[in-house]
Image: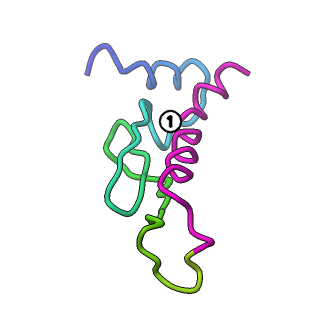
Amino acid sequence: MWPPPKQERLQRKTGAPPRRFPLPWTVRSSEECYWIEDANGKRFAHTYFVDRDLPIGPDYERRLTRREALMIVRNIAKLPDLLRKS
């Protein structure tokens, strides 16, 4: 492929290894969790939650709410931008 992708050109210039999870990262969801998906569709950083309307057992109070899980996964998705700025 010519010209080579930006990531490949950067790797040649700096000698840095290729990204394991290429950008952009996207937050996705299902009925029980949120996760991040990279540019290749690889899933990582799954964050599970429970709806407070449906108690599930003795550890019910220790589980994340939907809102808490979403905040965590959104903050993880921001990491590449934060690291680039520092």
Question: Quick one: which residue is furthest to the left in this view?
Answer: 1
Where 76 sits versus 16, above or below?
below
Q: Residue at x 50, y 53 (%)?
A: 45
Q: Residue at x 52, y 59 (%)?
A: 65
| Viewer-closest of 29 and 62 | 62
Residue 58 included in the magenta stretch of the image:
no
Q: Position of residue 18 (x, y in %)?
A: 50, 36
| Viewer-closest of 86 and 29 | 29
Q: Residue at x 48, y 66 (%)?
A: 52
Most frequent secondary structure within the magenta stretch: helix
Where 76 sits versus 51, above or below?
above
Splitting the image into 4 quarters, where does residue 53 fall? bottom left
Where 84 sits versus 46, above or below?
above
Horizontal side of residue 30 vs 70, given as left or right: left
Horizontal side of residue 11 vs 39, given as left or right: right
Q: Which residue is mark 1?
A: 18
Name which residue type carries label 1.
Answer: Pro
Q: Residues within 10 Å of mark 1 (few under 14, many from 20)?
A: few
Splitting the image into 4 quarters, where does residue 33 fall? bottom left
Question: Quick one: which residue is furthest to the top in this view?
Answer: 3
Q: Position of residue 78 (x, y in %)?
A: 56, 32
Q: How is the image coloured?
A: rainbow
Which quadrant of the rendered structure holds the N terminus?
top left
Residue 64 included in the magenta stretch of the image:
yes
Give the magenta part as a residue range.
61-86
Where 14 sits versus 75, above or below?
above
Q: Position of residue 71 (x, y in %)?
A: 56, 44
Q: Position of residue 51 (x, y in %)?
A: 43, 64
Q: Secondary structure at mark 1?
A: loop
Question: Quick one: which residue is furthest to the right in this view?
Answer: 86
